[in-house]
């Protein structure tokens, strides 16, 4: 295995779908929590941006290889 193949294998391992999909789902869940909590107006006012970032991240990650 030459250096280029090792680098590609490392990048492929880094950009696998399941861990990134879980992270994007967690960001969406955080945004929903921020939207539904009654304590802090700052959290409520930024919840849409967090949900949008998680959704865009999920769409991007859905194009990553499965394994």
Image: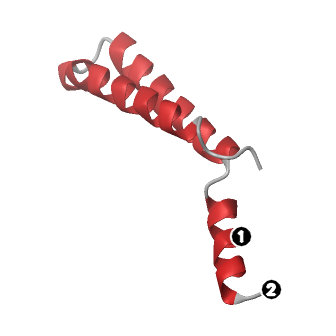
* Percent coordinates x, y for residue 46 in the rendering: 24, 25
| Rendered position, 66 above or below 25 | below
Q: Residue at x 55, y 40 (%)?
A: 61
**Circle on res. 56:** none
- The part of the image, by quadrant, that contains residue 32 is top left
Please name the colour scheme applied to the rendered image.
Answer: secondary structure
Q: Are marks 2 and 1 in contact (CB under 8 Å)?
A: yes
**Circle on res. 9:** 1
Tell whether 51 sits left or right of 2.
left
Query: From this viewpoint, which residue is outermost toward the bottom?
Result: 2
| Rendered position, 11 above or below 17 | below
| Rendered position, 24 above or below 10 | above
Q: Residue at x 61, y 55 (%)?
A: 15
In space, the residues marked 2 and 1 are separated at their CA atoms by: 10 Å
- The disc, 2 or 1, on the residue closer to the chain's N-terminal end is 2
Q: Residue at x 67, y 51 (%)?
A: 16
* Percent coordinates x, y for residue 6 in the rendering: 71, 79
Q: Residue at x 52, y 35 (%)?
A: 24
- The part of the image, by quadrant, that contains residue 2 is bottom right
Question: Viewer-proximal residue, 61 or 5?
Answer: 5
* Percent coordinates x, y for residue 45 in the rendering: 20, 20
Question: Viewer-proximal residue, 29 or 18?
Answer: 18
Q: Residues within 10 Å of mark 1 (few under 14, many from 20)?
A: few
* Percent coordinates x, y for residue 22 in the rendering: 62, 37
* Numbered disc 2: secondary structure: loop
- Reading the image, the residue beneath label 2 is 1
* Numbered disc 1: secondary structure: helix
Quarter of the rendering occupied by the N terminus: bottom right
């Amino acid at each position: 295995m030459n250096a280029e193949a090792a680098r590609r294998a490392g990048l492929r391992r880094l950009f696998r779908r399941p861990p990134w999909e879980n992270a994007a789902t967690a960001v969406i869940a955080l945004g929903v929590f921020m939207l539904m909590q009654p304590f802090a107006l700052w959290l409520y006012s930024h919840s849409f941006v967090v949900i949008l970032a998680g959704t865009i991240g999920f769409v991007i990650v859905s194009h990553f290889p499965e394994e």
